[in-house]
Amino acid sequence: MNPDPHHRRMFIRRMGTATGVAAGTAAIGSLFHNRNLVPAGEEAKTIPSFLVPGTEGMMVVAEGPDPAFAVRAALQELGGIGRFVKAGDRVLVKPNCAFDRPAHFGATTSPAVTGEVVRQCIAAGAEVRVIDNPINHPEGCFVKSGLMDAVQSAGGEVWLPSAALFARVKVGSLRIPDWEALYRPLAWANKLIGVPTVKSHNLSGVSLTMKNWYGLLGGPRNRLHQALHEVVADLGQFIRPTLVVLDGSRLLVANGPTGGSPSDVRPGDVVAVGTDQVAIDTFGARLLGHAPDEIAFLDLAAKLGLGVVDEAQLKLFRKVRAVS
Amino acid sequence: MLRRSLLAAGWLLPPVLALLFALKGRHYDEGFYLPPAAAASALPVPGALGAWTLEGGDVLPADRMFEKIDGKADYYLQYGAVELCSGEWVADGQRWDMYLYRFKEAQGARGAYNGERPADGKPLEGIEGYAVPGQAAVSAGCFYLQLNAQTAEADPAPAVELARTLASLLGGVAGDEVPDAAVDLAVLAGDAAAGTEEYLPENAFGFSVFAGVRSIRVRLGPGEAVWFTCPGDAATVAAYAEELAAFGGEECFDEDGMAGGAMFGSWSLAGVMEGAVWGVQEAATRDALSAHWSALRERLETREESP
């Protein structure tokens, strides 16, 4: 039997076309499928240090009933905000805005301290954006905590998190080598100021400066609570801030991190401002009645070279009375 | 004509499928990066009560409580919390945030409530609850309810009335459902009490053999420790001694019907008295442990002799 050569050519041509379409389909599908904004396989990005050279190892404690005045007094003692923030800088401010609770529960940074930090940066000529990835609905947390009003009235902008802002970043060396975090805001900024509050924590004992960077993470971060002290030390490696302003204007002394009752909050009348996260966290732990050796992440962070537990080893340590 | 249409449809099908496949791939779960929105579920309370209406009510089961109270969920879970109901009660310009925890047992609700109850909380008459400026809370049946104001100075009176109504809906007065302890630990500790009484339904102090534990922190000359009691007998004490040794307990002892030892720098012991297990936890030294045990025994005996 001699098959019709026309039919054979037609068959081959159609088979070839069908194969091409199938291959094209597969190529298009695999090219676009699962192109998440944060693909799991994406190489983790590195967050640069925001520390201003020459400002390492500094801490000033300012005591006084007016939190904003205390912030100004501490900054002045450190050489003024201009030593850390210049005109034209893009400053990212990270308060603790974790929960949609009113400020008086002490679960979030006080509006007075956050507002003053924003005001100082703007006075220095910087553009200021404030960000957090709260536990609850972000906008609700910023509104209910009073931080939205405080930031906007100080001239800053609240940057609400969205999925597009996240990317995989390198974090630390102990538990979380890399994780999803608010990369784009961190890439936008050339200065970063942490403004944590002083509060007890059900799992880590205290929540202060380094724990505050947890709010820059996304993903299933509740899993991180399984080894929280190591994770907090990792967070200390993750972020090397320009400045930290620890808000001890009131202290959540029990039932943290959410707070159980307004009675769990005590007046603190103090702020600690500086660049050594470990020293500042040690100071904050003492405010809550904890010796440094009771808080495991302090020792871990110190051993990683992130700072010093003993304030006597700081390059600059001062206490000032901030009374107007 | 029909054949051509079918052919065209056949050629178009693969690219369309590829497009759908690609579009699906571009979908990302925002909840992976951001706090997911809580799924609405049946609330154990109505959406309106008199002048009050509940806004934004939602229910989170135990495994999703972290979405609302990350870092604190473990506290309630250790008491057997099964869900967290939240929302905002609104009436006449007032807004009170509701945190309503449901527990497996009424004892769990009472334990979590006792653990958070502030020392300055003003007791509510007729129900197990307290009020402070800006807050009212009650323990009612298997529920622990908190109503929180938007300002620290808010008069809790309206929230107290709302809490009373909710408590009556949620299982009545808590005190009816929590079995009375044979011995009131607060009375036993007297002036030495350094903390409020707590109830630990299971795995108390990390020991699986201790369940239904009542405890109180007590301050004596040698330092603070925790006194506790729970149902059990000599077999419970023996099982505790075994767990202590298995978990790396040091300098373990077993004498005069009681067993104990040190672990992670903290001393503890347990023994049987009055048909129940009694013991001391978290003593800083062996001497402190002995002092607390002696005081505990003495107070129990004195109590027996009292008219």
Image: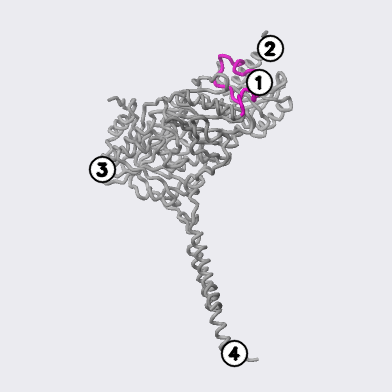
Dot 2 amino acid type: Glu
Give the residue pinned by disc 3. A125
| Farthest-out residue, front | B50
Asked if one can make out residue B235 in the rendered structure from this viewpoint, the answer is yes
Give the residue pinned by disc 1. B181
The secondary element bearing badge 3 is classed as loop
Measured in 3D between alpha carbons, the distance from the residue under mark 2 to the one under mark 4, in whole angstroms, is 112 Å
User: Which of B98 and B194 lies nearest the eye of the viewer?
Assistant: B98
Measured in 3D between alpha carbons, the distance from the residue under mark 3 to the one under mark 4, in whole angstroms, is 83 Å
Give the residue pinned by disc 4. A4
Dot 4 amino acid type: Asp
Which circle's residue, 3 or 4, is located before the other in the chain? 4
Q: Is residue A22 left or right of residue B177?
A: left
Q: Is residue B194 magenta?
A: yes
The secondary element bearing badge 1 is classed as loop
Q: Which residues are magenta?
A: B171-199
Where residue A89 appears, x then y in whole percent?
Answer: 29, 46
User: Which of A247 and B176 lies nearest the eye of the viewer?
Assistant: B176
Residue displayed at 50% across by 71% down: A24
Please state the chain letter of the residue tagged with numbered disc 2 in the rendered image: B
